[in-house]
Image (tube, rainbow, N blue to C red):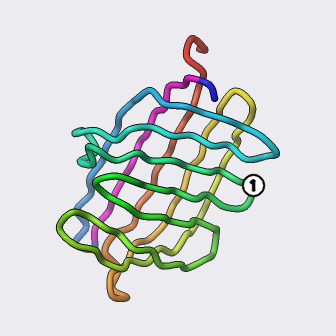
Amino acid sequence: MKDVVISINSTFTFEEGEEQRMEFTTDGYYFYEDQVGCLSYEESEVTGLPGTRTSLFVMPDQVVVDREGTVTSRMVFKEGLKSAFQYATPFGSATMGINTRRIAQNMGESGGSVEIDYVVDMEHVVASRNRFEISVREIGAQ
């Protein structure tokens, strides 16, 4: 595991046209082996998920996002795939769906980036179209 700096830019566009953006940078850990990049970081007040650890597993054809702690979920992103996941919070849980429109990634030994464009639905009704970009670089790297 390497100590890394993780930069995350997210855009959420809701049905009524409202758009929310979130950008933050945090420290985390990264490991790369057999074409799979694994990174993890602690969520914070900035993301609205304090007490939650997020781990991403970036593979050549899919990305898996696991959250454990205050919020628990496992999301599988695979281009062209619709999937469902359970989103559990201290206030209850809900089943949500994701339709992955596009994944672009270039992860390697020293880090890299991944971008995912996807649609979230609840009860088969589109809730938002989301896009997030994550870049990972070793601490001290430019």
- The amino acid beneath tag 1 is Pro
Disc 1 residue crowd, few under 14, some 14–19, many 20+, Cα 10 Å: some
Secondary structure state at the residue bearing disc 1: loop
Q: Residue at x 27, y 48 (%)?
A: 49
Q: Position of residue 26 (x, y in %)?
A: 40, 29
**Residue that extends furthest to the left in the rendered view of this protein:** 91
Q: State which quadrant residue 72 falls in.
A: bottom left
Residue furthest bottom as drawn: 124
Residue at horizontal 59 percent and vertical 25 percent from the top: 137
Rendered position, 142 above or below 13: above
Q: In this view of the protein, which residue sits in the foreground, 75 or 131?
A: 75
56 sits left or right of 106 in the view: left
Q: Position of residue 129 (x, y in %)?
A: 39, 67
- The one nearer the camera, 32 or 12, is 32
Question: x, y (%) of residue 30?
Answer: 60, 33
Which residue occupies the foreground of this view, 64 or 100?
64
Magenta segment, prevailing SS (helix, strand or loop): strand
Is 51 in front, or is 121?
A: 51
State which quadrant residue 88 falls in: bottom left
Q: Which residue is the site of mark 1?
A: 60
* The residue stretch that appears in magenta: 3-14
Quadrant into which the C terminus falls: top right
Q: Position of residue 125 (x, y in %)?
A: 33, 85
| Residue at x-position 68% and y-position 43% | 37
Task: Judge whether residue 48 is colored magenta.
Answer: no
Residue positioned 58% across, 59% down in the render:
64
In magenta segment, residue 8: yes
- Please indicate whether residue 32 sits to the left or right of residue 5 in the image: right
